[in-house]
């Protein structure tokens, strides 16, 4: 899949999702790859009992222009203080799966966290612990501090498969956030480690 097609897909996605309360499109330019990401988190009821979280990624290798696509969406129900069941689906590396699990989610003006522990509804499933947390605060009338961390740990019934972390630290100006970041990866039962530093630019609707 070519880069222009991927960028077009994310542009359409961003335009269609403007009504969501926490909607983001981000480009991360690292040393070996570019990650184009769009995600949104939205409470569907005033009391936050029902919420939806969706994440869509395209990871583009600079040398080969090969693209890996990831799509992950879950619908959660808050039973007690943000804790409750989730149902959803994921597409990754040609593998489409229904998901079920539990979540804890909380959203405020300065702070957002959503965590999910899910299993694929299939024989020999992958299990995943996913976390996205964000913290920000104003520095002056125009600029603010922005930080975000994503963490995903994937394993089967026997061994660790892969994990990744995405750290972003920078500034916020109007609807834009920009700064430095790292993507780190761990693979296999030995947790072989890779790190890819870079810069990010994101737009929040």
Image (cartoon, rainbow, N blue to C red):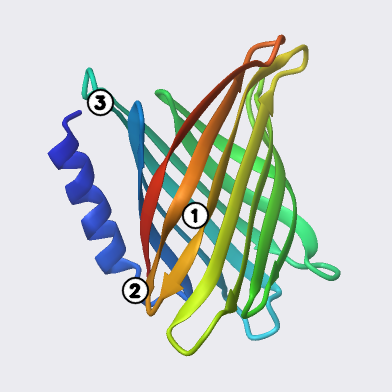
Q: Name the residue under label 3.
A: 62
Q: Position of residue 158 (x, y in %)?
A: 77, 12
- The mark nearer the N terminus, 1 or 2, is 2
> Tag 1's secondary structure?
strand
Residue ranking furthest to the right: 80
Q: Mark on residue 54?
A: 1
- Residue position marked by numbered label 2 in the rendering: 18
Q: In which quarter of the image is residue 147?
A: bottom right
For the residues labelled 2 and 3, the Cα–Cα distance comes to 30 Å
Residue 203 versus residue 101: which sits nearer the camera? 203
Residue 193 seen in this snapshot: yes
Q: Where is residue 196 shown, x and y percent of the image?
A: 46, 30
**Of pointers 3 and 1, the one earlier in the residue sequence:** 1
- Determine the residue positioned at 55% across, 80% down: 139
From the image, which quarter does the N terminus lie in?
Answer: top left
x, y percent for residue 10: 27, 52
At 64% across and 12% down in the image, what residue appears?
A: 188
Identify the residue at horizontal 34%, vertical 30% (top origin): 33
Asked if residue 167 is positioned above or below residue 84 in the image, the reply reads: above
Give how far apart the Cα atoms at labels 3 and 1 are. Answer: 26 Å
Label 1 Cα crowd, 10 Å radius (few <14 / some 14-19 / many 20+):
some
Name which residue lies at 68% across and 16% down: 191
Q: What element carries label 3?
A: loop
Relative to 102, residue 106 above or below: below
């Amino acid at each position: 899949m070519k880069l222009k097609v991927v960028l077009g897909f994310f542009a359409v996605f961003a335009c269609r999702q403007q009504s969501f309360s926490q909607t983001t499109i981000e480009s991360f330019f690292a040393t070996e790859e570019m990650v184009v990401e769009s995600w949104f988190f939205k409470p569907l009821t005033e009391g936050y009992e029902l919420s939806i979280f969706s994440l869509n990624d395209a990871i583009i290798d600079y040398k080969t222009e090969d693209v890996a696509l990831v799509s992950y969406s879950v619908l959660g129900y808050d039973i007690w203080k943000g804790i409750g069941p989730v149902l959803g689906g994921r597409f990754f590396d040609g593998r489409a799966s229904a998901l079920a699990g539990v979540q804890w989610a909380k959203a405020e003006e300065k702070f957002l966290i959503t965590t999910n522990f899910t299993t694929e509804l299939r024989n020999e499933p992958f299990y995943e612990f996913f976390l996205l947390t964000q913290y920000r605060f104003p520095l002056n009338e125009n600029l603010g501090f922005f930080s975000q961390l994503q963490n995903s740990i994937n394993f089967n019934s026997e061994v660790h498969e892969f994990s990744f972390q995405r750290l972003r630290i920078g500034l916020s100006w109007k609807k834009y956030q920009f700064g430095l970041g790292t993507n780190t990866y761990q693979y296999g039962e030995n947790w072989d480690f890779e790190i890819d530093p870079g810069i990010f630019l994101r737009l929040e609707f």
